[in-house]
Every structure is written in C-alpha cells, then in structure tokens.
C-alpha cells in the first residue's frame, strides 16, 4: 500500500507538468511533433493512473474508498481535458492553411475565426437540445475526428452526473 501511495504524487506531477508543457506550446504549427508526443504520453498516463487507482481501490478501507474514487475520477478528468486540449490544437493546426496557399489565393493574411468552445451538458433536460445540436454540428459530424476523439470530446463535455456516467468508459483508438 505504501508503494502505491508514493506513486500517486509522482503521477499527479506528471499530469501537471504535461499540462503546463502543452499550455506553454500555444497554437503554433511548429509544435505539431511535440503535441503528438504529448498526446501519446497523456494516453500512457491514463493507463498508469487507472492501474494505480484500481490497485489502491482494492486495498483501501471502506471509509477511504469514496475519497480515493473521487480522486481517481478527478485525475482522469484532468487527463481527459488535457487530451481534448491537445486534440484541439492538433486539429486547429491541421485545419490552418499554409502561408503559401494564402499568397496563391491573392490573400495577404489568413482569416482566423474564433474558436468554438465545446458545449457542456450537466444532465439537465432543459440543456439537452442545445447541447445535442451544437455537439452534433461541431464534433459528431466532423469527419476529421476519429471515433475515439469524438468520445473524448463527449466525455470532456459532460459535467456533473452526466460526466460521472461516462467516466468509466475507456478511450480506445479502435472505436467503431
């Protein structure tokens, strides 16, 4: 048990450092290789965090179980948000036209539209239609996103009870 609890801050630190590194990169096309590396690393961290907390949950007393489980879901949510952020940066970099294309079209500067924020849904029925329509238009119908990325965006968009329900579903690259 002691060995597991000593690994916990190490993994939390890795998540924090990775998040800080991604935020420091910003939205530049020169950083695509680093973003892809960070994306792979964050996926590995999801597995490591899951293994650690599953082992801890098997060992903790009933009093500590709920706290440990909440901590586990908090770390998974941090990683989900990080992966969504990385995927968003990768998608926006891939969607940006090269500067030579701008000159070929006679344009001296690319028009940059504001980013559309992913909608959020907390489980309230009154929010459903607006969430559904915006999520479907921006994420679900986007053919440039893999099914795993779409699920990642969905998990990141759900808050409260709705988010808890999908938290246990793993993100897999080979989703159909």
Image (tube, grey):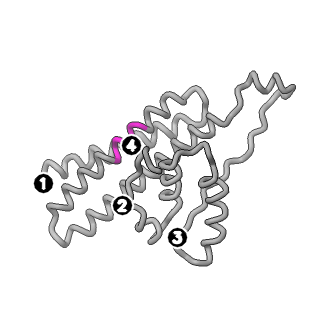
Gap between marks 3 and 2 measured at Cα: 17 Å
Residue at the right extreme? 106
SS at badge 3 = loop
In percent of width and height, residue 82 lies at 46, 47
Q: Select label 1 or label 3 by which is in front.
A: 3
Per the picture, the main secondary structure of the magenta-coloured stretch is helix
Residue linked to disc 4: 43
Q: Residue at x 15, y 68 (%)?
A: 61
Tell me: residue 72, above or below residue 48.
Answer: below
Crowd around label 1: few <14 · some 14–19 · many ≥20 (10 Å) = few
SS at badge 4 = helix
Gap between marks 1 and 3 measured at Cα: 35 Å
Gap between marks 4 and 1 measured at Cα: 25 Å
Q: Residue at x 60, y 53 (%)?
A: 139
Residue linked to disc 1: 1
- Badge 2 or badge 1: first in the primary sequence: 1
Q: Select label 4 or label 1 by which is in front.
A: 4
Q: Residue at x 50, y 57 (%)?
A: 156
Residue at the front extreme? 176
Asked if residue 41 lies in the magenta stretch, the reply is yes
Q: Residue at x 12, y 54 (%)?
A: 1
Q: Select label 2 or label 1 by which is in front.
A: 2
Q: Nearer the viewer, residue 60 or 144?
A: 144
Residue linked to disc 2: 168
Residue linked to disc 3: 122
In percent of width and height, residue 19 lies at 44, 43
Using residue 134 as the reference point, say whether residue 159 is left or right of it.
left
């Amino acid at each position: 048990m002691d060995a597991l609890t000593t690994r916990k801050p190490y993994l939390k630190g890795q998540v924090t450092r990775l998040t800080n590194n991604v935020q420091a990169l910003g939205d530049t096309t020169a950083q695509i290789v680093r973003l892809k590396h960070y994306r792979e690393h964050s996926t590995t961290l999801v597995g490591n965090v899951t293994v650690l907390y599953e082992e801890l949950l098997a060992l903790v007393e009933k009093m500590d179980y709920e706290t440990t489980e909440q901590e586990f879901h908090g770390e998974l949510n941090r990683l989900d948000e990080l992966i969504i952020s990385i995927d968003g940066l990768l998608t926006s970099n891939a969607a940006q036209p090269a500067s030579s294309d701008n000159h070929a079209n006679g344009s001296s500067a690319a028009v940059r539209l504001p980013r559309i924020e992913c909608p959020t849904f907390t489980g309230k029925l009154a929010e459903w239609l607006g969430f559904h329509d915006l999520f479907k238009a921006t994420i679900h119908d986007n053919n440039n996103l893999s099914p795993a990325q779409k699920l990642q965006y969905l998990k990141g968009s759900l808050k409260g009870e709705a988010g808890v329900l999908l938290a246990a579903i793993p993100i897999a690259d080979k989703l159909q």
